Image: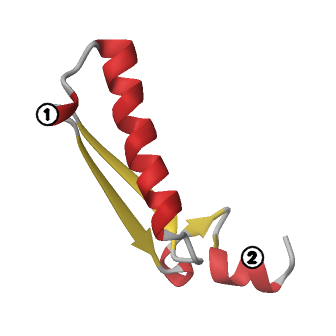
Amino acid sequence: MPYVNIKVTREGVTAEQKERLIRGATDLLVDVLGKNPKTVFVVIDEVDTDNWGVAGKSVTQIRKQGR
């Protein structure tokens, strides 16, 4: 029973993009590991950019600086 957790910043990921991520992750586990797609769980968490840090700065700060 594979469980995949995808975390992305909350910056406008569309429902269609989420569906593609879910389908793609499921297909990957089916193709590579031979898993039954009915047992593959995919969860997408959207995280505020204030709560996601890289190199000591929040993504919000990084975006404001244009990096």
Per the image, the residue denoted by label 1 is 39
The relative height of residue 21 versus residue 15 in the rendered view (above or below) is above
Identify the residue at horizontal 76%, vertical 79% (top origin).
63
Q: Decide if residue 67 is on the left or right side of residue 32.
A: right
Q: Quadrant of residue 30?
A: top left
Q: Secondary structure at mark 2?
A: helix
With respect to residue 44, does 15 lie above or below?
A: below
What amino acid is labelled 2 in the image?
A: Ile
Q: Which label's residue is closer to the chain start, 2 or 1?
A: 1
The quadrant the N terminus occupies is top left
Q: Label 2: which residue? A: 62
Q: Reply above or below: 4 against 47.
A: above
Residue 59 location, quadrant: bottom right
State the image coordinates of residue 19 (x, y, percent, origin top left): 42, 55
Q: Position of residue 6 (x, y in %)?
A: 40, 52
Q: Is residue 8 above or below residue 12?
A: above
Which residue does the image show at 57% across and 69% down from the upper left? 53
Whole-percent x and y of residue 27?
39, 29
Q: For the C terminus, which image quadrant?
A: bottom right
Residue closest to the eye, 22 or 9: 22
Looking at numbered disc 1 in the image, what kind of residue is underneath it? Thr
Q: Are marks 2 and 1 in contact (CB under 8 Å)?
A: no
